[in-house]
Amino acid sequence: MIGRRRAVLAPVLVAAAVLTGCGSGSQGGGPARISVSEAYIPLPASPTDAAGYLTLHNTGGTDDQLVKVGSPDARQVTMHRSTATSMAALPELPVPAHGSAAFTRGGDHLMIMGLAHRPTLGSTVRLDLTFARSGTITVKVPIKPLAYRPSDAGTASGS
């Protein structure tokens, strides 16, 4: 009887172990691994407010979410979504496993308000990107000409 229980119990334990790795947001490739590219701030007309754009990449096997953006160089940084007729605050930005999410002109973007210093071409603004699973990544975002498009932009420096 004991041998029969073990024979029935063994497949159940194997199935439980496999299913444990299939939790919400996990695609079996390990933790989220976030990097940032194409980060830039177009030179703003305002001495204190600007918009920011960047692309988030997740090469890991677990979904993540950007939940907060801060900066020691600004009073406040908020995430927004623009449509043809409105702009609304975003509470978070999902970054899927093995995928990306972006803040782009005309779409989701960062509003950087209360800059401590007037932005100049070539200067940088530090952004602290806080993720639900991956913690905080610091990025130095360069100020670019107003008409700049990131087609040739490299990966931003993060730490």
Image: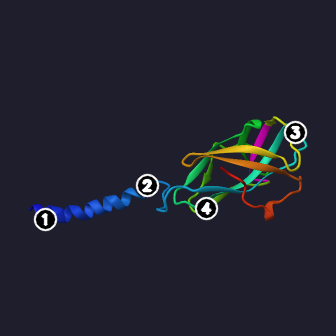
Residue 76 in the image: above or below residue 98: above
Q: Are marks 2 and 1 in contact (CB under 8 Å)?
A: no
- Give the secondary structure at mark 3: loop
Image quarter of residue 71: top right
Q: Is residue 156 left or right of residue 35?
A: right
Q: Is residue 17 left or right of residue 151?
A: left
Closer to the chain start, of discs 4 and 2, is 2
**Residue at image mark 1:** 4
**Residue at image mark 2:** 23
Q: Amino acid at mark 2?
A: Gly
Disc number for residue 99: 4
The answer to which of 109 and 156 lies nearer the viewer is 156
Q: Amino acid at mark 1?
A: Arg
Label 1 – label 4 distance at C-alpha: 46 Å
Q: Residues within 10 Å of mark 4 (few under 14, many from 20)?
A: some
Closer to the chain start, of discs 3 and 4, is 4
Image quarter of residue 11: bottom left
Q: Is residue 103 magenta?
A: no
Q: Is residue 62 left or right of residue 38?
A: left
The coloring applied to the image is rainbow
- Give the secondary structure at mark 1: helix
Closer to the chain start, of discs 2 and 1, is 1
Label 4 – label 2 distance at C-alpha: 18 Å
Query: Which quadrant is home to the N terminus?
Result: bottom left
Q: Residue furthest toward the left?
A: 1
Q: Amino acid at mark 4?
A: Gly
Residues rendered magenta in the picture = 106-113
Closer to the chain start, of discs 2 and 3, is 2
**Residue at image mark 3:** 118
Q: Are marks 1 and 4 in contact (CB under 8 Å)?
A: no
The answer to which of 88 and 91 lies nearer the viewer is 91
